[in-house]
Amino acid sequence: MPPREPDFPFEPAPSLPWDALPALFPGFPRPERWLPLLRLHLSLVEAAEERVRVTAVAPGDAVRRQYAESLELLRLAGTFDGPICDVGSGGGYPGLVIAAVLPETPVRLVEPLQKRARLLVHMAAAMGLENVAVHAVRAEEAGRGPLRGANALVVARAVAELRELIEYTAPLAAPGAIIALPKGSRADAEIAAAGHAFQELGCTLAGHDRMRPEVNEAVTVVRLARCGDVPAKYPRRPGIPGKRPL
């Protein structure tokens, strides 16, 4: 799996205050519960920084770049009913953020780096998120294990071309599930190049929408629908999707 830090074009903007999030995301109820959890999460990330590096985003930009973008990804994913899988969860963006606002929904975090996986376990416990399970495996391995075909929504903020990301995520999606992938300025070109990957992995393009300017209008969320079968040969062995994308 590629490095976790997203590589989206981003124009400097005024810092977004924490108390702006409930107004930006009125569809997520009980902000009096989840907003303190998100603030706690940031403090846990900062406390772990010397031991485990999980982000290059400056603290002053974190509310917008990490928390607002994670919530916007969830908002644009649309309607789904069932477990969520975050592929390459890193420091918990968006997985732990999603788990905080959807406490009744099982959230599976796939993170291959053992230090980061242990940190995710620690942070989920500190936040009291009983709906979180951490899987310390590569995405290619997760797609051949018990998570295969078991999620109603699959997300990934990892830096990789769309053709590669589809191979990591489609095997984890249940029939009829949504796969939501944020992309930068090359979103249209990557969608155009991914036709064979869509067909090969049983997916169709369900839509693609830019995030709102208040969050990051340079990011487009590409939504795929898992509408067909994913052949048993996918995902291929670790490293191959990146070297030879479909």
Image: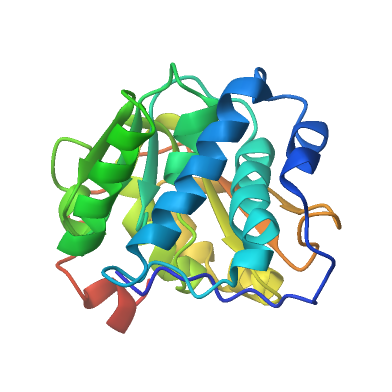
User: Can residue 125 be seen?
Assistant: yes
How far across and down, in percent of the image, does residue 134 sit?
23, 42
Q: Residue at x 53, y 64 (%)?
A: 195
Q: Residue at x 76, y 68 (%)?
A: 218
How far across and down, in percent of the image, does residue 206 sit?
64, 43
Looking at the image, residue 149 sits to the left or right of residue 142; the answer is right
Q: Residue at x 24, y 49 (%)?
A: 231
Which corner quadrant of the image does residue 189 belong to?
bottom right
Q: Residue at x 22, y 49 (%)?
A: 143
Q: Nearer the viewer, residue 221 or 230?
A: 221
Q: Nearer the viewer, residue 197 or 49?
A: 49
Looking at the image, residue 39 sits to the left or right of residue 226; the answer is right
How far across and down, in percent of the image, does residue 234 sit?
23, 56
Looking at the image, residue 104 sits to the left or right of residue 15; the answer is left
Q: Quadrant of the N terminus?
A: bottom left
Q: Nearer the viewer, residue 11 or 143?
A: 11
Which corner quadrant of the image does residue 16 belong to?
bottom right
User: Can residue 94 be seen?
Assistant: no
Is residue 174 positioned above or below 219 on the image?
Answer: above
How far across and down, in percent of the image, does residue 210 sit?
77, 56
* Residue with the most extreme bottom position: 243
Q: Quadrant of the C terminus?
A: bottom left
Q: Nearer the viewer, residue 210 or 26?
A: 26
